[in-house]
Image (tube, helix red, strand yellow):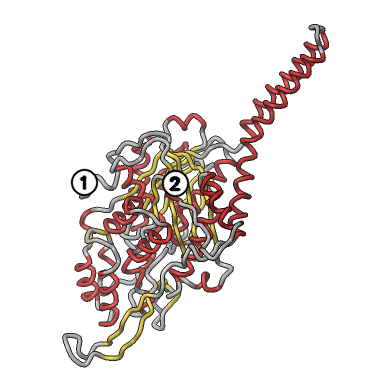
Amino acid sequence: MEYLSPEIVNRGVEHSGPYAGSPSFSVKVRRGLPDFLSSVNLKYVKLGYGYLINHGIYFVAAPILLAIFATQMWKLTRENSCLDFTYFLNFFAVLGFLCLMLHVYPDLTPRATYLVDFACYRPPSELKISKEDFIDLAKKSGKFNDAAIQFQEHVLKNSGLGNETYLPRIIFQPDHKVNLRDGREEAAMLMFGAVDNLLAATRIRPKDIKILIVNCGVLNPTPSLSAMIINHYKLSYKIQSFHLGGMGCAAGITAIDLAKDLLSAYPPSYALVVSIEAVTFTWYPGNELDMLLPNCFFRMGSAAILLSNHRTDRWRAKYELKQLVRTHKAMDDRCFKSIHQKEDSEGKRGLSVSKDVIEVGGHALKANITTLGPLVLPVSEQLHFFTSLLFKNKSKPYIPDYKRAFEHVCILATSKKVLDEIQKNLDLTDEYMEASRRTLERFGNTSSSSVWYELAYLEANKKIKMGDRIWQIALGSGFKCNSAVWKALRNVRQLDINPWNDVN
């Protein structure tokens, strides 16, 4: 999760004009992301090459086995000029050993993780809300003072959100208090809506799902959200289920990583990942400005993703997971405290966003892409980078061109300010940013499901071609930055369940 990084300055009380007698304030935006060109932390470069070596050893093993076999055959041929019994015995011994290795090798190597399909939920039209309606309903709710209303109006104006995002109206009712029933009802609508769409698209039977992972930042009821899905769809009693809570907007990719590991432990299997955020349970009905930012950005949304490590599913899957890198900065106090849940002076609970959030998020992003680089960048870019380090001069170190590694980029749709900063630092074109900006405008920040709405946008506009590489970037409280890289296994066609259908 990422937001603007405002420094709120109280200017006293207005003495004239339409807001006479009301508190006055100004919002100063601090410097955005750290300059990615200023320095490079080599420990993250080393970490990336460590991942590369660990992942590559399995693919190096096969050529080595073939080389050993060829060498042994050549030696046998040289040492046995005539075809005697010993020659045939040795020949079949070597051949048998090779066949045994080829039989065992697939079970020793990690199975590929395939994304069979995914679905994003589009809430009903009656829940659409414009920025003007948002402010009007906030005023009528009687929960915010004039300063809080002005602040939210200012943030919405510069947020990058459009006028057709979705919010539950109950949060604006004057007598409404945050409660578990409303949170469960919203979660049920979001989860079941996305999963229903996914099951319809894949035609998979619920009982065939062996792994279930649900992530939601704030709503953590008992029974859990994963138990709600198991009960609703009557999933198998053998299912391995998990509920990830309190991990923010980066939890969706964390869930993919967990699913990948579990698929390796239970091959061959199907894994269902569901990413949501219940807005009714994150809504803050108070007046502390640092806690009002989530109100302005969070909107309803959910995604359901079906993963598989069945080798036969490669022929029907959309994507293959190529790399996944997670970076966690919670050991640093500023990062740890940048986004946290708390109660205000009146005991009202909400998410507090520090003025340092963009800066610490930028450092997490910088560390993450530095680790990811050796896994995805062309050799020419890596050589250029190391040459600039070996022959240091007064100029800044060369930062590789990540546009050469990916055809598409899906950055968590957080705020216009954050997307602008990331585009500038990574030197991305408007085309690379299109999916993120359009998702922010149309659906707002749907938390961990945001990157899936962006991928759905690319599919709806027929931009995904076979062999394309897609980079998903998610940031979240802690502070975390996660990257997932997918490779398209075919030209992806638009489906009827796409949330962008009939969207202008």
Give the alpha-carbon distance from disc 2 to disc 1, as whole Å. 33 Å
| Above or below 454: residue 265 | above
Task: Indicate which label's residue lies in the foreground, 2 or 1.
Answer: 2
Q: Amino acid at mark 2?
A: Arg
Percent position (x, y) of residue 44? Answer: 59, 58
The residue that disc 1 covers is 502
Q: Amino acid at mark 1?
A: Asp
Residue at 55% x, 61% y: name it: 40
Residue at 58% x, 53% y: name it: 386
196 relative position to 372: left or right: left
| Above or below 504: residue 263 | above
Which residue occupies the foreground of this view, 427 or 185?
A: 427
**Upstream in the sequence, badge 2 or badge 1?**
2
Residue 217: image quadrant is: bottom left
392 relative position to 132: left or right: right
| Above or below 423: residue 346 | below
Percent position (x, y) of residue 207? Answer: 46, 38
The residue that disc 2 covers is 404
Which residue occupies the foreground of this view, 426 or 257?
A: 426
Q: Is residue 9 visible?
A: yes
Count all numbered tags in the image, as a single digit. 2
Which image quadrant: the N terminus?
bottom left
Percent position (x, y) of residue 81? Answer: 80, 9
